[in-house]
Image (tube, rainbow, N blue to C red):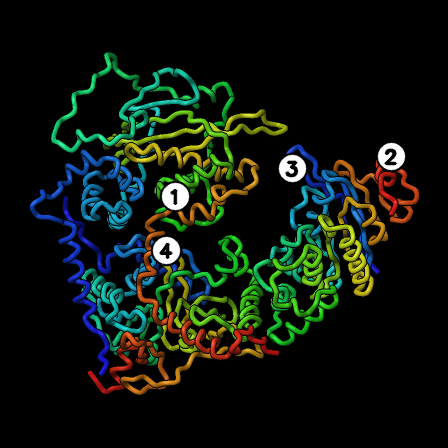
Amino acid sequence: MYVAVKGGEQAIDAAHRLLDEERRGDRSVPSITLDQIAEQLTLAVDRVMNEGSLYDRELASLAVKQARGDLIEAIFLIRATRTTLARFGYAEPLDTQAMRVRRRVSAAFKDIPGGQILGPTFDYTHRLLDFSLTGGAEPAEAARAPVELRGDMPRVLGMLGSEGLIEQPSQAAGEPADLTQDPLNFPAGRDLRLQNLARGDEGFLLALAYSTQRGYGRTHPFAGEIRFGTVEVSFTPEELGFPVVIGEIAVTECEMINQFKGSATVKPQFTRGYGLGFGQCERKVMSMALVDRALRAGELGEERVAPAQDEEFVLSHSDNVQATGFVEHLKLPHYVDFQSELVLLRRLRAETGAEGDRLEAAE
Amino acid sequence: MNAPAYNFAYLNEQTKRMIRRAILKAIAVPGYQVPFASREMPMPYGWGTGGVQVTASVLTPEDTLKVIDQGADDTTNAVSIRKFFVKSAGAATTERTEEASVIQTRHRIPETPLTEDQILVFQVPIPEPLRFLEPRETETRTMHALEEYGVMHVKLYEDIAHYGEIATTYAYPATVADRYVFDPSPIPKFDNPKLDDCPALQLFGAGREKRIYAVPPYTKVKSLDFEDHPFAVQSWEQPCALCGSRDSFLDEIVMDDAGTRMYVCSDTDFCSRMRGEK
Amino acid sequence: MSPLLVAEKVSKFYGARTGCRDVSFALWPGEVLAIVGESGSGKTTLLRCLSGHVPASSGKVRYATRDGRSVALDEMSEAERRLLMRTDWGFVHQDARDGLRMGVSAGANVGERMMAVGERHYGRIRATATDWLKRVEISENRIDDSPWSYSGGMRQRLQIARNLVTSPRLVFMDEPTGGLDVSVQARLLDLIRGLVKRLDLAAIVVTHDLAVARLLSSRMMVMQQGQVIEQGLTDQILEDPQAPYTQLLVSSVLQV
């Protein structure tokens, strides 16, 4: 006699305990600490902060550990945490020009005031596995530069701008919209687009950016400037009425120089693309800048022919927390709807002739 | 690092207020999709965050909550959501439809008729009935505003031309209060008649797509069809193998490797009541 | 009898660039007007302004509705305009893919306008669609096929059927025979001419091909660089072109 299957609740509890065991792994191996993750898997933590939209290294490290290294799962944990936090208000815009630079390069000029600073980068490493990392040997100390870096490196795009060669940064009137407070509506302003891209999945943006370079909406980009370092965060509490520095964060910024545009009344100028992210995330901010520029097709009078230029397509599918939720929701039971389809299909097949003729339409 | 303390039903009061305003708007314009600023919840998008946010916003300490998925209380996701409300709101819960004041559901409407004292909250994956015919949000918004629903009947026409009948079996579109065409969520079309003139308040939450809509009590809901191909519900040859009901939606259970099939009520509470249990 | 459509100094500018400038004319019911010019002459821009696809920069376009009112396009609500485009007006695109739903059957394509205005009887929709396919010389056993399986000429005829099913009073056509073989063109033009006469349709046809203008239209406007340089009766202009550019056009037409 068939008895309806029960015990879903116990099954879930047991599954969670099994997950905890799997996460811990072999107990003779030391449990990984949050410090180790923050110090040595820094770039994973940076990505989780970016796409989780929350700057907190400790929480992001915990998320990486809890998610067993699945970064999108970790990003989800951070987003969910973010929802519960109290909001005090908005910080003053970050002054990235005053950045304490650790890395700063430009592909547009051979040399620039302040210098080309390579900083810590994989760029020129040879991608050969380094087996010395398997032991416990510590790396030798890196040489320090004899002089201090400039604290106020001028923007490369600013130098072009003073000659009128590049469009001015947009001076949109009014307060920027807040993606986390209002639902996204189309057409979306550049402020919402950039917010969406900042927390967008790195892989998705990378592929779209790549597509623009391969002809799907070419924008002739040059990396005007990429800088990575720390910036101060200022906030104006209501009671004080003036801004106070509440801390500093590491960010990476990319300004792309793109295809020039002109019209009958305006002389041709280069156009801009912009990317900004927490921590060191060059691939992300470069991709973001390329996609930002592609999405500006409408305001720059360009025909939208490529996926990267399609605002609704890009902005609706960039959020990996939403994407993974919906893709993975297919694992949930769908047997009622499937049953409905089975009933229909069986009936249609029964009514179809033996030779599989298409059913004559009624009337 | 300290673990944060949560508000009643997880959401803060500001968020609940925002969602309630969206709900009121939705009730004022039956079937119209009201955009709302959906929050990230501890369960993934696509797993009921819209329904959970709606329930969290209407739940009071005096309510009794029932959560079902595919008509059953014991399916994994229903269990998970019910536990969430027990943990975050200390909610009283029940499996009996007639004892619940708030029912959150995925893909079914309970067989037991609902009353004026009840709220039914549906989990919605894709709120836009026109979405698969027209992917652009800007265009579908205009189509709803101007009542341009011709394209929906094009789809039904195609079905009849190719299959001899309308081939939509779930998420079957209907007109609410003779105005907006809506997607009632992926309930089987078998359940569509229950939407019409229902004494309970029916609320629909789509978290990922950020829309809320509603069918107020005793509102007309008419499923789309043609005069010469009227809307019809599914039926089975066999009754429920456990309780004998011929009026409920049946699940198909595969019994053995030879493929033997058995049919039982999808609504587990209804089935056990019919069997005189509990 | 009053004119169906009146254009008063219609102009469209894109920044400093002129799309079309100061175009004025009146179109009467049952009349076919050809707008002739080379690519870049502004004829397509003008058509898009006249048909409400694009707002004019200045000037007025007035349409006489079935209930006798004269409404200006720019004063209409979005709802009114879209309703007009679905019922009173038709628009035949140069590329049929722009004017058809390629993903649904021919029958659905023709029936859509009926369903859009409330027809809810499948049998009647199908019968009307079948009838129209016959009228545009498409075999009725192709009714359930998707337009992907249709030839270019067939797609164009399907587009015409889709537009005419709700008996519009005015049809806009943008190079209706463009991209088709010469023999297919001839057959299509014949069909259009017959339908226009039988249904007493008014039409505005944009074309670079004088032969199309000659066959379909009673009146004609010649455009160059955004302006109308000559307009009048088609026969007269083709017989005795006044403007130098028109003379050039006429003389370069191959005598068939």
Above-or-below relation of A296 to A151: below
The Cα atoms of the two marked residues, 2 and 1, are separated by: 57 Å
Q: Earlier in the sequence, mark 3 or mark 2?
A: 3
Chain at tag 3: C
Label 3 SS: strand
Number of other residues with Cα within 10 Å of mark 3, as a class: few under 14, some 14 to 19, many 20 or more: few
Above-or-below relation of B101 to A154: below
Kindly identify which residue carries mark 3. Answer: C14
Q: Quadrant of residue A152?
A: top left
Contact between labelled residues 4 and 2, with CB atoms less than 8 Å apart? no
Contact between labelled residues 1 and 2, with CB atoms less than 8 Å apart? no
Q: Quadrant of residue A346?
A: bottom left
Contact between labelled residues 4 and 1, with CB atoms less than 8 Å apart? no
Q: Is residue C128 visible?
A: yes
The Cα atoms of the two marked residues, 3 and 2, are separated by: 27 Å
Kindly identify which residue carries mark 4. Answer: B208
Closer to us: B70 or B149: B70
Residue B1: x and y in percent read 14, 43
| Kind of residue at badge 4 | Arg
Residue B233: x and y in percent read 44, 79
| Eye-nearest disc, 3 or 4 | 4
Q: Quadrant of residue C202?
A: bottom right
Residue B67: x and y in percent read 27, 69
Kindly identify which residue carries mark 1. Answer: A204
The Cα atoms of the two marked residues, 2 and 4, are separated by: 63 Å
Number of other residues with Cα within 10 Å of mark 2, as a class: few under 14, some 14 to 19, many 20 or more: few
Residue B76: x and y in percent read 24, 66
Chain at tag 1: A
